[in-house]
Amino acid sequence: LSKMMKENLGLTEWEAGNAGAIYRSCQAIYRQYGEMLGLCVEMMTMRAGMKQAAQEQVLGCNEKKVASRRCQEQLDRAVFCIFLRSKKSWFYTVGTVLAFHQDADSNEKGKANDAITVYCSQLGKETKAFLRAGDGAVADLEKLGLFCNGVDDTLMLPDNWRFCSRGLVELEWLPPDGDKTRRRRQTLQTLSCVPIVIIPTNTVPIDYALFFVSPFHAKGEEVSRDVPDLAVQGFSWNEVEEDGVEVVHDARAAPVAA
């Protein structure tokens, strides 16, 4: 429209975002070319302005919808955590392993940001379970910032873990007495269904943390009792070799120890 006004009607002052310039240009068209042409230009201008206003309104609505959804998620999380704190208990259920994330910057046990994304069908959410190792089999809840006031339960952390591939992680568990001869190894693959525990935190705003349940914990056997062996196993990750293609670097593969 601006190009047409300048080239065909000889108008130099035409800016679609300037209401004053649009008004003066329309008045000039009225005077020079007649009422009908001026009315047509005015309708075209209004249509262009309405389109721009509609686009701005859509953007504003989208931003409000996103903010509303995030607010609803935070409220749901807060109410759920407050419920657990009032019950003075933790929430045990079955989680589905979705993805593995290894921190390549640090290999020190308990210090790296290694994590596993787990989907909880009870909550309808996916959460990262950060792998942590304590001084022993039982975790220090206060050090982890977890709610433990009045809770008659213990959190057992893996003694060690190993990323075998992009779709396989092995967790090593020790019994509460620390007897290494009774060590157990748990294999996690993509879509493995395993027992998890959700624990509210002492942070502000309130939140929760997700951990895997030790096979030595009483709740571990109780939760996994009804899970089929095939669901526990999950799916193995098979690399597909293509003829004539050589992999020079795989950014998603587990780093090789020096």
Image: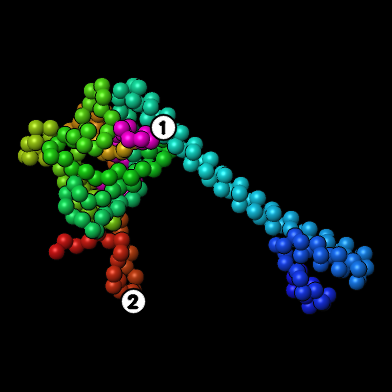
Which disc, if any, is residue 42?
Answer: none
Q: CA distance from mark 2 to mark 1?
A: 53 Å
Q: Secondary structure at mark 2?
A: loop
Q: Nearer the viewer, residue 73 or 40?
A: 40
Q: Nearer the viewer, residue 80 or 60?
A: 60
Q: Which region shows up in magenta?
A: 188-207
The picture places residue 162, in percent across and down from the top left corner, at: 19, 51
What's the amino acid at mark 2? Gly
In this image, 175 relative to 69: left or right? Answer: left
The residue drawn where x is 16% and y is 52% is 108
Q: Earlier in the sequence, mark 2 or mark 1?
A: 1
In this image, 240 relative to 213: left or right? Answer: right
Q: Secondary structure at mark 1?
A: helix
The picture places residue 36, in percent across and down from the top left corner, at: 92, 65
Question: Which of the image's four quarters has the C terminus?
Answer: bottom left
The residue drawn where x is 15% and y is 43% is 159
Would you name the residue on which mark 1 appears? Answer: 78
What's the amino acid at mark 1? Ala
The residue drawn where x is 66% and y is 55% is 55
The residue drawn where x is 56% and y is 48% is 63
Would you name the residue on which mark 2 appears? Answer: 244
Tag in front: 2 or 1: 1
Query: Local crowd at mark 2 within 10 Å, few (<14), some, or many (≥20)?
Result: few
Instruction: Locate residue 35: give its quadrant.
Output: bottom right
Query: 245 above or below 19?
Result: below
Query: 206 above or below 50?
Result: above
- In the rendered image, residue 202 lying in the magenta stretch gets the answer yes
The picture places residue 60, in percent across and down from the top left corner, at: 61, 49
Is residue 249 visible in this depiction of the protein? yes
Instruction: Locate residue 134: give its quadrant.
Output: top left
Query: Local crowd at mark 1 within 10 Å, few (<14), some, or many (≥20)?
Result: some
The picture places residue 89, in percent across and down from the top left corner, at: 30, 25
